[in-house]
Image: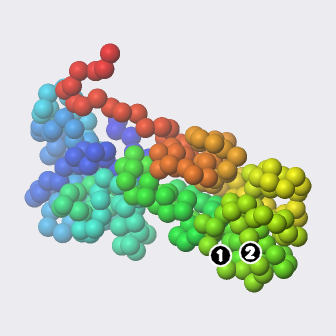
Amino acid sequence: MIALPDANTITRPYRGLSVQEVEIALDDDGAIVRYLVGREAYRRTEWLALVNGDRVALVAIAKESYEPLMSPITEARVLAGPDRTMWIEDPGTNVGNATQMAAAAAASGSVDTDAFVVKGRYEHVNAIWRPSPVTVVVTEVVPPYPAKLFDMARQVVDFDEDLPPVHLVLDAVEIAKIASDNPTAEYLLPCRGSGVDLPGHVSFLDTRPQVRSDWLLIGCERSMQFHRAFYGDEPAQVDLCPHLRSRALDARTRVLTKCCLLERGVEHRENTATVPWGSSLDEVRLALRLLCGIGPVVEQPRQGAPAAT
């Protein structure tokens, strides 16, 4: 028997959904099954969106074979009838992207719907089953604005069509707030890129000031290492490392953070993924995949092409 899909399921790629206009009653599951079984379907079709007027039903199917282009349907299961299925038209939605599909579903305001069928960008259509976005907290230092790691994570979520729906939440480590909580006459920040305006005099470690002042270092362990190398001592310090901050969050929370002690790659431990301070989009992508439980990118051979040897 065809099982119910997991929450957040969409067809990948979206050609797995076929939209069919029918004249049968969509609130009669038996009639739908009798209508479909024995008919031919494309080998890639997994779901059917059956449309009768303004009513829609979502049906999962199994076929006799997945090898020929067309094959008889051997089994059908109505996943959601018209009372639990919503048709949405949103030309801005990439229907191959689960996060955008979930956003379109949320924008509808419906709370009593299992299946959302979305006609989106390029008039492509896909469906999402019981969207329930995965929340990922992104811990990052600001300024600069926008928070770089958060912005990179948004870029990844927007293009990686293998991710489930993801809801990103910024947990900002604010330099100005740290300085306000630790007032002093002189501050030392890691680099000029921070671009922050503080009430005291501000020096930047990356310029290697010639005169060692009685400053407060707002920086991480790597900054302290540079200070010891430059001046041979350790100043007063407030650590701004987002990786350390992430440890204070609930252990059940999925966290994407960064640490300058990590040179390259991704460190993944339980619900926390850490990338280097100067991370690439590929590293952020892998971190999000690990947090969502889908692993690294695996290139698939083109259909009909010989496998690599």
Quadrant of the drawing holding the N terminus:
top left
Q: Which residue is mark 2?
A: 202
Q: Is residue 1 above or below residue 194?
A: above
257, 269: nearer the viewer = 257
Asked where in the image residue 22 lies, by quadrant, the reply is: bottom left
Extreme residue in the bottom direction: 199
* Residue position marked by numbered label 1 in the rendering: 196
Give the image's coloring scheme: rainbow
Is residue 65 visible in this depiction of the protein? no
Q: Residue at x 80, y 54 (%)?
A: 230
Disc 2 secondary structure class: strand
Q: Residues within 10 Å of mark 1 (few under 14, many from 20)?
A: some
* Residue at the image position 61 percent from the left and 52 percent from the top: 277
Query: Which is nearer the N-term, disc 2 or disc 1?
Result: 1
C-alpha separation, residue under disc 2 versus residue under disc 1 = 9 Å
Looking at the image, which is closer to me, 211 or 281? 211
x, y (%) of residue 25? 17, 59
Disc 1 residue type (three-letter):
Val
Q: Where residue 100 sits: x, y (%)?
A: 37, 61
The C terminus lies in quadrant = top left
Q: Position of residue 51 (x, y in %)?
A: 17, 60
Q: Secondary structure at mark 1?
A: loop
Position of 38 with respect to 292 (left or right) is left
- Looking at the rendered structure, the kind of residue marked 2 is Val
The one of 30 and 112 positioned closer to us in this rendering: 112
224 over 113 or under it: above or below: above
Residue 125 appears in the rendering: yes
Q: Is residue 188 left or right of residue 99?
A: right
Neighbor class of circle 2 (other Cα within 10 Å; few <14, some 14-19, many 20+) is some
The residue at the point 29 percent across, 29 percent down is: 301
Nearer to us: label 2 or label 1:
2
**Marks 2,1: beta carbons within 8 A:** yes
